Image (spheres, grey):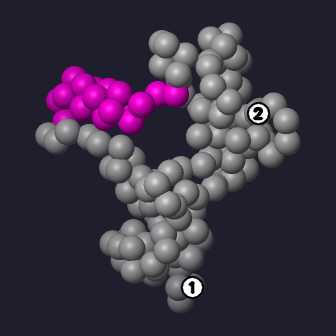
Amino acid sequence: MLKSFRGRPTAKRFRLYSRFSKKFSHATPILRMAEPSVLRAISAWLKERARMKPTGKAFFVFVSEQRKPLHRSTVNLLLRKYSAAASLPLLVHPHMLRHACGFALADQGADTRLIQDYLGHRNIQHTVKYTATNPARFEKLWR
């Protein structure tokens, strides 16, 4: 779910709230460092989404054709459908996107603690797997 810092949501000023369980949620200012093309795409989507006039009090980024928050089972179905259509050797699920984000941040040289905070890990051991598999992180160590 996205919530604006103040007032109406815009692509430049919102945070992503992820609900991992009924007891734990995490807020990430995800778009502060986004590329301009990403901000333009999100701005366009927010305008399109506003035309849909979604129901409910909370602001959810993705809504269904019924104008309600997109259900997690719908996301799972879509990912399975598109991974099969792409002839991938495995069926993609949402958590794989989370892992891809962690590995991408590690490959870009992000600090392990930063990745931990970004992904909302309570335990650093859950984050180390992203940085431990990237031997390129040592290349600039002695230059």
Q: Residue at x 48, y 69 (%)?
A: 121
Which residue reaches farthest left? Answer: 89
Q: Which span of residues is magenta-colored?
A: 69-88
Residue 46 spot, x, y in % from top left? 68, 24
Report the front residue among 95 and 56.
Answer: 56
Examine the rendering and report whether any part of residue 102 can be seen.
yes
Q: Earlier in the sequence, mark 2 or mark 1?
A: 2
The amino acid type found where label 1 is placed reads Arg
Kindly report the distance in space between the C-alpha atoms of the residues bearing marks 2 and 1. Answer: 44 Å
Answer whether residue 23 is magenta in the image: no
Q: Which mark is residue 65?
A: none
Rendered image: mark on residue 9: 2
Q: Quadrant of residue 12?
A: top right
With 39 as the anchor, is 101 left or right in this view? left
- Relative placement, left or right, of 54 versus 21 is right
Quadrant occupied by the N terminus: top right
In this rendering, position of residue 131 left or right of residue 7: left
